Amino acid sequence: MRYIPNTDADREQMLSAIGRFSMEELFSDIPQLVKDRFQPLGISSKSELEVRTKLASLTQKNAAASALSFLGGGIYDHYIPSVVQHITSRSEFYTAYTPYQPEISQGTLTTMFEFQTLICELTGMEVANSSMYDGATALAEAAMMAARVTGNRKIAVSLALFAHYRRVLDTYCWASGIEIVDIPTVDYRCDFSHVPSDIGGVIVQSPNAFGVIEDLADVKEAIGNALMIVAVNPVSLSILTPPGEFGADIVTSEGQPFGLPPSFGGPLLGLFATRKAYLRQMPGRLVGQTVDADGKVGYTMAAQTREQHIRRQKATSNICTNAQLCALTATVYLASLGGDGLRDLAMLNLEKAHYMAQQLSDLPGCSLLCDAPFFNEFVLRVPVDPKRIRDGLRVEEILVDDPAQMEALGVTEALRFAVTEKRSKEELDRTVDLVGRML
């Protein structure tokens, strides 16, 4: 956070220089509805000590800081090993920006190359870019890429998609002139028998918004020449068959579980991997390995599709950069765990989630949404107003997803729980006991 203690006189002078009379006039293009949601903190023209004191008092209002989190839907409360912050806080990493000059950017380029390698190994794909903004925009870029590759501007999308993924996807496709066709679900899984034939791509999420693991075995054959696009939970890939082995053409993900705190919803990390045949159509940037004049191994930018680089409006993608510090964080996180550690992590998530699901479903009137397999997220049907349970848990400093998220997907009287390795058996049992009392 940056705090610039401008006085009223400072602001008036700057406004006058650009021909404006007030801050309200400067921001007049912003809708009033948006402005009403953001109120001044009341810290202008104060000393550093006063600002720190004020902000410290405001942070005490953040219940999430000390609460138990069962929040899911794409962002999860995972443990972050101390080595991650130790490495990423080194000045040569967090001050590095653009690696266009390889002779002075070998450290940054090396970590980007290693990141790409790790994502390929996880997803079972042939090539990955050096990261994108977040999982939602990565998925939207995948839809646009499918339209470019196939020449068909119609995309079929599973209705079991995270709500924020769908909102971003709708915006991108609307602006790009891509038509979206909904794929219904049967038993909370995508029904691929309803995929039309005249499409450029099919988007499916696994585990999906209900926490259910989709059956991807025969999807590629069912959709013909359309590209198969799969959005995944990256932690699950260490114990589930990677989408690449099912014939996926593009795999995207939210990389936040790899060493990034939930914070207030960011910063995030978009993962994007595809087949080598589509490299020229892939958004973002790619780092490659080469040798210098002396035969020593080195790294350099191998592909860049941003609009500033000659092609302008004809560019493959308008994404201008990558989330490099977040990608470095994920790289350090994955390297510190290793393959065995990541599998152990995934198994802890799986086992703890299934333990809690069993305990909750044994409560009177409660049941799981369906019998389909799930990873670390599940939906519980409850016999009372789920908002009452959510509010009651919040009083006890336990956070669960807003039931409105399930209602938007057509599921009422239900709560979604996400369980990670951080939740102890005592915490799980206490939460189950509290829900039981509220019933």
Image: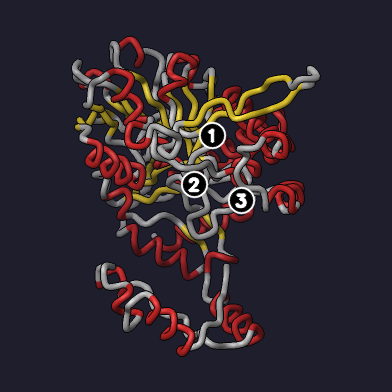
The x and y percentages for residue 424 are 64, 51
Residue drawn where x is 57% and y is 83% of the image: 54
Q: Is residue 13 visible?
A: yes
Label 3, label 2: how many angstroms apart (C-alpha)?
10 Å
> Quick one: SS at disc 1?
helix
> Quick one: SS at disc 2?
strand
Residue occupied by mark 1: 234
Q: Are marks 1 and 2 in contact (CB under 8 Å)?
A: no
Looking at the rendered structure, which numbered label has been put on residue 20?
none
Name the one closer to the observer, 4 or 213: 4
Q: Indicate the amino acid at tag 1.
A: Pro
Q: Residue 355's image quarter?
A: top right
Name the one closer to the observer, 402 or 11: 11
Residue drawn where x is 62% and y is 47% of the image: 97
Q: Are marks 3 and 1 in contact (CB under 8 Å)?
A: no
Residue occupied by mark 3: 423
In the image, residue 342 above or below residue 256: above
Residue occupied by mark 2: 418
Mark earlier in primary sequence (3, 1): 1
> Quick one: SS at disc 3?
loop
Residue drawn where x is 49% and y is 16% of the image: 276
Whether residue 303 sits left or right of residue 97 in the image: it is left
The x and y percentages for residue 422 are 63, 49
Q: Indicate the amino acid at tag 2.
A: Ala
Q: Residue 307's image quarter?
A: top left
The x and y percentages for residue 356 are 52, 45
In the image, residue 42 above or below residue 288: below
Residue drawn where x is 46% and y is 66% of the image: 394
Q: Is residue 373 visible?
A: no
In the image, residue 287 above or below residue 332: above
